[in-house]
Amino acid sequence: MNILIVEDNLAHQKITEYVLKHNKVTGKFFVVRDGQEALDYLFHHGAYADTAQFPKPDLILLDLNLPKRDGREVLKVVKESPEIGDVPVVIVSTSDREEDLTYAMQTGAAAYISKSSGFDKFNQELSSVLVYARKP
């Protein structure tokens, strides 16, 4: 299982990886720090041209508030792409705004996990994230 984590905040990235590993979510984690880097990875541009080293993910964990290109734009590009549109995207964001949740779900996100709902709820929701992953 290849999981792409798109997260600009190092602390949030570490917590996400900790929760996944602690809950025995197995797989290889790839981390990118902004929306443009996420798209470069997904479309194998620049430093991510090697498809063996940077495989198509089975799941994308996407923050909404990112530098360069925000997560809303990344989600839209992913879901409109014939090459990667089948990759499930789970939004993992501090935003609890109803319009963000609505946008994410209408644009094709598989799920929306709030980072600000408390650690126990975040842990519980993230621990079952593989149900959304692409099946090999």
Image: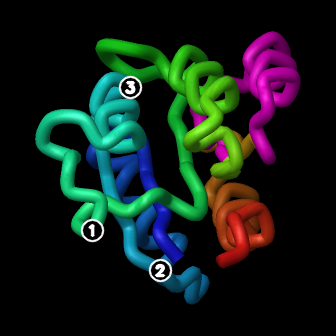
Front: mark 3 or 1: 1
- Image quarter of residue 99: top right
Most foreground residue, 55 or 124:
55
Residue 100 in the magenta stretch? The answer is yes
- Image quarter of residue 35: top left
Residue 77's place in the image compared with 130, above or below, is above
Give x and y (percent) for residue 75: 61, 27
Residue 81's place in the image compared with 59, above or below, is above
Left or right, 69 with respect to 110, comes to left
- Image quarter of residue 68: top left
Compute the Cα span from label 3 to label 2: 22 Å
First along the sequence among labels 3 and 1: 3
Residue at x 46% of width, y 58% of height: 56
**Residue ID for mark 2:** 27
**Residue ID for mark 1:** 52
Provide the secondary structure element on which disc 2 rests.
loop
Provide the secondary structure element on which disc 3 rests.
helix
Residue at x 57% of width, y 81% of height: 25
Residue type at mark 1 is Ala
